[in-house]
Amino acid sequence: MTQRLNATFSKTSTVFVAYIMGGDPDRVASQRVMNALPAYGVDIIELGIPFTDPMADGPVIEEAGIRARKSGTTLKTILDMAADFRRTNSDTPIILMGYFNPIHQMGEAEFAKAAHKAGVDGAIIVDLPPEEDAPLRKAFEPHDLALIRLATPTTDAARLPDVVRGTKGFVYYVSMTGVTGTALSGDGSGDISAQVAAVRKASGLPVVVGFGVKTPERAAQIGTIADGVVVGTAIVKALHEQGEEEALALVKSLADGAHSA
């Protein structure tokens, strides 16, 4: 619900958002990691929906999606994960992140109803532009679900009002062109400060920055200019290569970095 997102931003100066791919490596392990995230400093959870053609994702996230699909993960699995999480946590917002096709196959109204019932607070649909998302926003409205839009370095002043119109909760600023997991250019802070300020002014909403944030130091840098920091690829990579304990230790260090700002 938008209300849960608003409460999170109002009580934390810099929000830390962690992305995991739902169902990677399997439902049980993924659920265990998801349930643990708030205890390691995560303020908002982004739960990835695996998809067959993840055009915005780099190889780490793409391979996580392949593992998740091989383990049998579907959109329904992701909604079940959110519902399971809500049995023990009623405060931490859950944002689903993925592509439109699985939602279209379920039906916008049915998806919105199921997401609300599962305790989801909103969604980022990376391949659904503002010009085409009216049916989904209409379906979200009765359930107070946030449809969160993406702004990028190529979003110019003429297009920005269209991008932020109808957005709820926050705006996700993609810090560079390209796919997930790419390093930020420059020093990671001054390069994007003007863009973050412009998005915040246009939307009147908090702005979180993601794509390419990999270290606590970079999270702290971004946190000085944005309202929130998102990390995904580094967490997914650590989970796959080093296991749950090391991945959660990384999450804690990144959260501490973001919160130090």
Image (cartoon, rainbow, N blue to C red):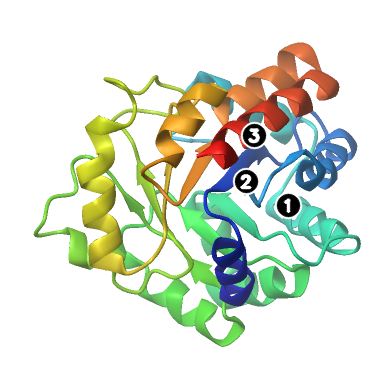
Residue 50 position within the rendered picture, expressed as x and y whole percent measured from the top left: 62, 40
Q: Residues within 10 Å of mark 1 (few under 14, many from 20)?
A: many
Q: Are marks 1 and 2 in contact (CB under 8 Å)?
A: yes
89 left or right of 41 in image: right
Q: Residues within 10 Å of mark 2 (few under 14, many from 20)?
A: many
119 left or right of 213 in image: right
Residue annotated with mark 1: 78
Foreground mark, 3 or 1, reads 3
Amino acid, disc 1: Ile
* Earlier residue among tags 2 and 3: 2
Amino acid, disc 3: Asp
Q: Of helix, strand and loop, which one carries label 1?
A: helix
- Farthest residue toward the bottom? 142
Q: Of helix, strand and loop, which one carries label 2?
A: loop
Amino acid, disc 2: Ile
Kindly identify the residue that appears in the image at 75 percent across and 30 percent down: 70
Residue 174 position within the rendered picture, expressed as x and y whole percent measured from the top left: 35, 40
Kindly identify the residue that appears in the image at 12 percent across and 50 percent down: 156
Give the Cα separation between the discs numbered 3 and 1: 27 Å
Residue annotated with mark 3: 256
Total numbered circles: 3
Residue 150 position within the rendered picture, expressed as x and y whole percent measured from the top left: 36, 52
**Residue 119, quarter of the rendered image:** bottom right
Image disc number at residue 49: 2
Kindly identify the residue that appears in the image at 25 percent across and 32 percent down: 190
Image disc number at residue 109: none
